[in-house]
Amino acid sequence: MKLSRVLGFSLLTLLFSFQLSAQKSYLEDADRALYEEEKYFEAIEMYKKAYVKEKGRDVKAEIIFKIAESYRLSDQTEQAQVWYDKSIIAQYADPIARLRLAEMKMQNGKYDEALVEFQKYAAERPEDPRGKNGIEGAKKAQEWEDNPDTYVVEPVVLINSEFYDYAPTFADKKNEEMIFTSTREGSVGNETSEVTGDNFSDLYFSQRDRKGKWSEPVLVEGEGVNTEFSEGAAVLNSRRNIMYFTRCKVEKNGYVGCQLISAKKMGNKFGQAEPIPISNDSAVIGHPAITPDDKIIIFASDLEGGMGGKDLWYIKEEGRGQWSSPINLGPDINTEGNEMFPYVRDNGDLYFSSDGHMGMGGLDIYHAKKQGEGQWGKVENLKAPINSYSNDFSIIFDGDHDRGYITSSRPGGRGKDDIWQFSRPPVLFVLKVEVRDSETGEILPASNVKLIGTDGTSAEKETQSNGQTEFADNGGESYINPNTSYSITVSKPGYLNAKGKETTVGLEESKIFAHLYELIPIKEEGIKLPEILYEFDKTTLTDQAKDSLDYLYDILVNNPQIVIELRANTDSRGSDKYNLKLSQGRAESVVKYLSSLGIASERMVPKGYGETNLLISDAEINKMATEEEREAAHQLNRRTDFIVLRDDYVPQDQGDGGATDSGEE
């Protein structure tokens, strides 16, 4: 994981020491720089010089591995990957090189390659759970990257620099002022960190204007805040009048430590800094977070009694300026890895970063639900795009909104670590409607489209010259709301109404709904229905005929104001009298069936026309070449259609569409 910079530089494990006297060998100097002093950049150069002088193959392989370690701990993951691979080729004996190679490939976003290396490590060391966990993690990371959440994550260009910029916190109650940590030029301390190669870190201030633009960052004012040492990772209490932050310093004898500092706000400045006594001076304590009631401070530390690495601990207020002994958050939160950068949201939930829980590569951000005073659990990875294969940490939320800021070293930023803003775009729904003539296909402008929602809302629009209209933005609000079902009615004079439905219930992502409605023109010559079949030489409807009549049923329901004449026709075969009687019986069968579905019988007038209204004459049929063609022509004559008699029907029972309650059910 890319922890050297975050653990060291982010004011948690950054331990500085003075120049040492000359050493016996490059290798001894390099080991001391790597393991004792954390001077990773210096260690790399020393190891490379030692490698040139060394003759033994095994020692040379070990030096290559230590070069890789130095690159890893100095947050240079691509170089670390190269050198871990070289150490394996050089037959470095410890399989840890394989595990580290897999981790570097994870942090470089090469999940498929990392999976292969984790599998190899698991085969070499089946007793080590890191191999199995790595396999699962690589698969999960790829899945999360391929299926990201709807958040949009963008760098805050006006705040970031080419150096390390991280750990933002709001400095006022309106969240319009921000304090963050940076190693940019202009810091109070004029020393250069041998861990990061940059300036010591200081706290900086920026303010957002009405347009959302952040001002040029300046050093936080106050004699007790920024010093010649490293300060950073701050948080303010609920009243925004006390700031807690981290300070790491070097004593004259090289003895180092990091501690929590408090400073009261006095006007636009902060007053005297006061350390919060938690442990001895050698402890690494930092990254404070505070609960909304200001009674608990959570921090990261390597205090004795932890789970391993850096754990999250907390202290409780016991009186004015007095705090309890540190309490570990326990195994639900802490792991054998490192847990850091805690943040407590207004609802009491905890957010933190870790490389011990299953993640996407570097540090990932996790969420834990509040379960009681000083208790959090049900840890969940925030996944992509909040997390990435790089280091992601120091999340803050802008009030109860689904937006805020994180720190990330992902590509696309300005410097090494940058501050990024995230927000979840509002879920927007748009309904697009196009209306055409069902027979000619021509567009129908000036058609009325009406929406009625189950939430009580309604809206109407007319189609434009292109036959289209849409329901999108409505003066800053949407016509189509979440978790709502809509009935759609399309109407135009001279046409039958068409209806439809749409719903946003259960949808969590924006969507465009598109509907084409083809309106049936009302014509004197009648409106054709789908083929309706009867039993041979009978008036009884077949099952297929009943399916066809669903079309007419929908028309009558969608147009509750019309009264129709249901017209049944026969072909020319058989006597005129018989065909007339047969067609009348068939028309009455249709009316009876639709009445059974709830359509008011007074809306349908059955009329049998026998063979008096042929579409194709016998003379035309007789001229046809085949029996198949002639039979098809007779079938066209045996049609059922309808005409609209009037459109002013008012049902006796004001039910839907003139249908009885049973019909609507």
Image (tube, rainbow, N blue to C red):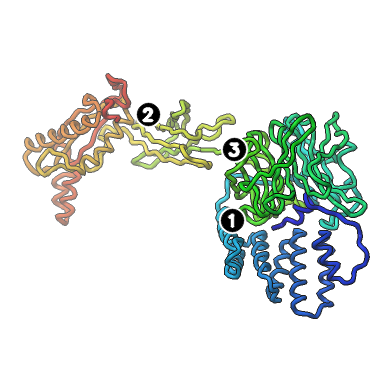
Spatial separation of the CA atoms under disc 3 and disc 1: 28 Å
Residue that badge 3 annotates: 371
Give the quarter of the figure containing the C terminus: top left
**Residue 588, image x and y in percent?**
16, 32
Q: Which of marks 1 and 2 is in front?
A: 1
Residue type at tag 2: Pro
**Residue 584, image x and y in percent?**
13, 33
Callout 2 secondary element = loop
Residue that badge 2 annotates: 493
Residue plotted at (15% across, 42% down): 534
Spatial separation of the CA atoms under disc 3 and disc 2: 62 Å
- Give the side of residue 76 with respect to residue 381, left or right: right
**Residue 26, image x and y in percent?**
86, 71
Callout 1 secondary element = helix
Residue that badge 1 annotates: 141
**Residue 109, image x and y in percent?**
64, 59
Q: Nearer the viewer, mark 3 or mark 2?
A: 3
Give the quarter of the figure containing the N terminus: bottom right
**Residue closest to the eye, 645 or 215:** 215
Residue type at tag 1: Ala
Q: Earlier in the sequence, mark 3 or mark 1?
A: 1
Badge 3 vs badge 2, beta-carbon distance below 8 Å: no
Q: Is residue 596 above or below residue 516?
A: above
